[in-house]
Amino acid sequence: MIEFDLPAISQFVDEHVIPLEPLLLSQQWSELNSALSRIRKKVKYQNWWPTHPELKPMPLYHMGLLSEIVGRSPLGHYAFGFQAPDIGNMELLEQFGSAELKNKWLRPLKLGDIRSCFAMTEPNNPGSNPTLLSTTAEIKNDQWVINGHKWFTTSADGAQFMIVMAITDPSAPKHLRASMILVPADTPGMKLIRNIPVMGHSGHGYFSHGEIEFKDCHIPVNNLIGKAGQGFKLAQHRLGPGRIHHCMRWIGVANRCFDLMCKHVKNRQITDQQVLADQALIQAKVADAYTSIQAARALVLNTAKHIDDTNFEATRFNISMIKFHCADMLQKVINHSLQCLGSAGMSDDHIIAYFYREERAATIYDGPNEVHQLSLAKQILKSY
Ligand SMILES: Cc1cc2nc3c(=O)[nH]c(=O)nc-3n(C[C@H](O)[C@H](O)[C@H](O)COP(=O)(O)OP(=O)(O)OC[C@H]3O[C@@H](n4cnc5c(N)ncnc54)[C@H](O)[C@@H]3O)c2cc1C
């Protein structure tokens, strides 16, 4: 098992990754991409590239600790090569991909040489219930022919391949109707219609959400991941470890916002005699944010350990808990922090405004919070 030097990585993030954030905030995409390439070389040189194909996969617990540290910057996961949705696709191909798919797509993905995306959600169906899809894949002349419409496909812009969830057997029971198929980006019939504008920003490359159209898109039958009809099961597997990565990243974001808030309130003079930190109402926010972060952190690390010791199936209960608990914690901490910074917090010059905008989606993707609350409550109430 590899053991990373987490304090050294934390220092690296402070010295090399956080200084690149102005390029992201001012949307200087080509400068940002070049700078990220340089940083990635440094990360690899230090042997800190967690998904390197020659390394044994790290336990989720350790991956979680790394995610927390690098998650303090929105660029951290990109610098270390385990950003969503690539990391989820790596875990999926590792477990369910054929030797051919692994060799052609997984290896370069793990090395950070190519990028990928994951297309499940559709504009005309509820993403909260992935058994309801309209995109179809039929076998004709030994090829899958895909037709349909997807959106919010994160990082589709510039990705070399996409994993598409499509209905392959409409007459099967609802959990066995869909399959996952790997679609290379240059395949005729697949079109990126646009990068969807999100809260005033259209994004670019990694930082984009695509709307995609499939019209008679022909794909080799061997590009099926797992077996036909396993799409729903694979989606659950993909999202299990993914929730640990997201939740620990969110804890990193919350720590960063908390830190910025505390530094600001200690220095912001509000009368001749007092700074903001002297106010009881501000102190309550500090105590509330700190406790919320620590509680979320303990819950996620406990869940990661449980997955490492057992398996994903045995940990579904905890995974639902951490998803909505951490997403709610994140909204609260970012909001407290923005409030304490006042107008500076609202400014697009500032990382807090970026987090406020970008991380609002945490309660929606990877299963909306309500869906996890329902699933958890049902499991709890079974025992009464
Ligand atoms: C920034 C961002 C990135 C994303 N990236 C990807 C991606 O890479 N690939 C991909 O396939 N998808 C992606 N998505 C889509 C995401 O997974 C879906 O938005 C999510 O599954 C919810 O689906 P929906 O938007 O269709 O909402 P709906 O299913 O229409 O639900 C709308 C709202 O209703 C509420 N709700 C839903 N079900 C229930 C219920 N049973 N009880 C009570 N309330 C309920 C929830 O509040 C939910 O937000 C992304 C979304 C965002 C915002």
Image (tube, helix red, strand yellow):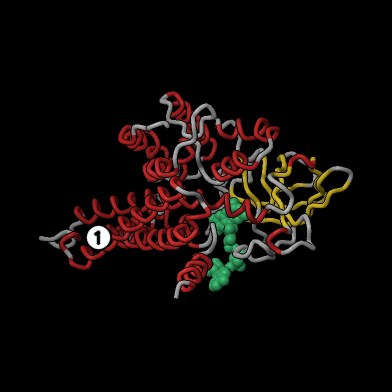
**Residue 181 percent location from the top left of the image:** 72, 46
Element assignment for label 1: helix
Residue at 30%, 54% in the rendered image: 258
**Residue 128 percent location from the top left of the image:** 59, 64
Q: Quadrant of ligand 1?
A: bottom right
**Quadrant assignment for the N terminus:** top left
Residue 198 visible to the viewer: no
**Quadrant assignment for the C terminus:** bottom left
Q: Is residue 93 left or right of residue 32?
A: right
Picture quadrant of residue 169: bottom right
Residue 320 visible to the viewer: yes
Of residue 23 and residue 313, the one placed in the foreground of this image is 313
Report the residue marked by disc 1: 286
Q: Amino acid at mark 1?
A: Val
Name above or below for residue 280 compared with residue 298.
Answer: below
Q: Is residue 279 left or right of residue 180?
A: left
Of residue 169 and residue 343, the one placed in the foreground of this image is 169
Furthest-top residue in this view: 45
Residue at 23%, 64% in the rendered image: 282
Picture quadrant of residue 201: bottom right
